[in-house]
Image (spheres, rainbow, N blue to C red):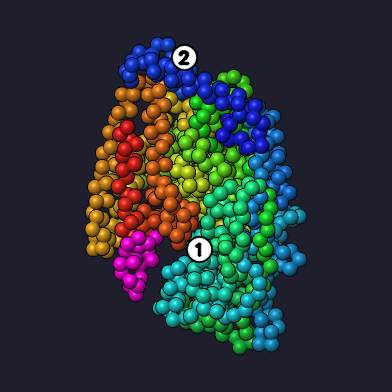
Amino acid sequence: MALPTLSGPRRKLILAGVSLVVTFIVGLLIGRFAISSQGNGANLSGVPRAIIQEADDTVHEKLASRIKAENIRENLRQLTSKPHLAGTPADYRQAKELADLWIQQGFDDVTITPYEVLMSYPDLARPNVVRVRGQNDEILYESPLTEAILTPRENVPGVVPPFNAYSANGTVTGDLVYVNYGRDEDFKYVTEDVNINVTGKIAIARYGKIFRGDKAKAAQKYGAIGLIIYTDPADYAMGANSSDVYPHSWWLPPTGAQRGTLFVTDGDPETPGYPSIDTAYRAPESQINLPAIPVHPISYGEAENIMKYMSGPVVTPDWSGGMNIVYRYGPGFNNQTLKHVEMRISTQNQRNVTYNTIGIITGAVEPDRYVILGNHRDAWVFGAMDPSSGTAAMMEAARVMAEMVRSGEWRPRRSLVFCSWGAEEYGDLGSFEWVEEYMKNLGARTVAYLNVDIAVSGTRSLSVGATPLLNRAVYEAAKRVVSPRGDGSLYDEWLKAVPQTVSGQSPQPRIDPPGSGSDHDPFLLKAGIPVANIGYKSESQYPLYHSVYETFYAMEKFYDPDFKIHASVTSFWVELARSLSDSLVLPYNVSDYAVLLEQSRHDLDNEYGPILKLNVANYSALDSYIKDFKRVAAEFMNSLGAVNRNNPLAVRAVNDQMMQLERTFIDPAGLPGRAYHKHVVLAPNMYNAYAASSFPGLVDLLGQLDASRDHDSQWKPIKKRISPFSFSSSIQLLRH
């Protein structure tokens, strides 16, 4: 049975009507018995048992026992057999295959939702290339057009050459300047401390630390005419020799290059803030915030061939990488036969259609409340880790949950919505357009969005980034899942790997803020929906990321040979979804938000406290506001024990209060200079889209302070940004 608000406008009205009637009847029953109750403590003996039934915890064991590692392995093998870049025929083929599978498995409603969005591709007839030219303009070095084939797995048609999506096209020539990780502070150091003018030059930076699009933004800001980004072996090969890299280990070989988008916002670039449906207004490209300079990724083997001839001062030790060269800032070359570097980039932007596949298991009691599980399908090449390990896990999670429903053994209290997104790699295009199209209903009705972009990319432990409301549910789910090593729970293993102690509490596994860079973004940053981003990782990013070598072979050989890690992650994802969809009272803890707010204030005070106290008269009130929120949150949690669980209206009321808390941190106007990010507590850092920031809009403005500019004009917007932090809406919500 379809949920009317989640089916596209193209769906037949009769499906929407039937579902609306069911929802109305359930609401009528809840209202009927609640109104006749004479208060929270009344005896409601006439309420149908299903409406007030506590969750059946034995369902967890039944679901977990059905999860098969061999199924996930086979899913991944098939998903990675061919490239599946967004906007290509493979994009639709996989969307259709998944839709057909979910229909076969008995989902109540399955739809494929297409969106025409602006994407970006290299011109294969004029390949992107980086050259070194001699004094007579002869070509002395030219980067390879493709990555070398190292195993039969890579030798298939349809592999797109390394490129950076949305790069400007054209040919630029100039001297080379090394800028470390390409952060704003790196460009500032080269410009001010080393005294090298980057204007008119080509910058070369190593991948890591920040989002690649922010590297391009910084290069453009400091006047560079082009940017080359390479994967340094210090970050991606850890000093491994040629026999210790792929295909002999998981370290990146010298021929591997990292593809990726440069788009620093999210969603379709041509329809910012609105869904890219047929009637949408599309902004001209000249008005879109896309890179204005050519940008191109190369391998560290290619970078070494270019950078070993650079001239200029030797870099500081922390700027040296792992190549067998002397790292120098530049500009230019120390070899008199070399003249300059040339970038010839042919990447073009073009509209293409991408597809979301949406499958729904309708809730038995509250069909108008949604627990959403999401993963994207598209990959730059094979995507064995990103995203197909997550897709393989979601396919198994969907199978076992649908099987339980079809057999009549179980149906969740609330609706489960499985979302397979298109074009995430370009900037969360599929998920953003869907959220923008259904924003009102999703914001009012969604319990949580649970994202698994990459199920397995390491061997250490579970890793979760989540909004604080979900911390309790995450911990409880991890305690119920067996570790892939079989020596305790997933929680125990996680606690041992990454313990974190909060003042006054026993150590718990570290849950990071969600950050940005995957399909949870629109749910949190635009709609104010609690989110969790789940995966099993090592201490650092996996080295084969976005290269042609991210293959099924690599996953099976080096990461998860028996696919027990995949099975554990799937079991955790299923249990977390079951808990949120089945619990009579939602397993949130609003007090955990107070912990985050206190930590954010502490971080803010450490970095900017003195200047804030000097320039903002009411800055000290921030501490009082957080203490007020903490007190009210504690009172609310204490009151949950007194809620009459036999009164469906009382239960619905407290659940809605907790659901709506995340929405109170949404500023409709958005953050300064980036209105597309609206969450005032958990939006990403302005200079690194991957990382979270403490009170981001405020910190953005503080980071831009310039002693040479007018004092009052700079501090006025900072003072305005303090006002949302009274948390009056949050406090009022929890009080009433």
* Secondary structure category for the residue under label 1: helix
Residue 68: percent from the left, percent from the top? 61, 33
Please tell me whether residue 643 is drawn above or below residue 419 in the rendered image.
above
- Mark 2 to mark 1 CA distance (whole Å): 55 Å
Residue 258 magenta-highlighted: no
Q: Quadrant of residue 216?
A: bottom right
Magenta stretch secondary structure, dominant: helix
The residue that mark 1 highlights is: 214
Q: Residue furthest top?
A: 45
- Give the residue type at disc 2: Pro
Between label 2 and label 1, give the one nearer the viewer.
2
- Give the residue type at disc 1: Asp
Please tell me whether residue 400 is drawn above or below residue 241 in the rendered image.
above
**Left or right side of 135 for 311:** left
Please tell me whether residue 402 is drawn above or below residue 502 in the rendered image.
above
Q: N-terminal of the two: label 2 or label 1? A: 2
> Does the image show residue 256?
no
Q: Which quadrant of the rendered structure holds the N terminus?
A: top right
* Secondary structure category for the residue under label 2: loop
In the image, the segment drawn in magenta is: 700-717
Mark 1 packing: few (<14 Cα in 10 Å), some, or many (20+)? many
Residue 194: percent from the left, percent from the top? 43, 80
Residue 712 magenta-highlighted: yes
Marks 1 and 2: in contact by CB < 8 Å?
Answer: no
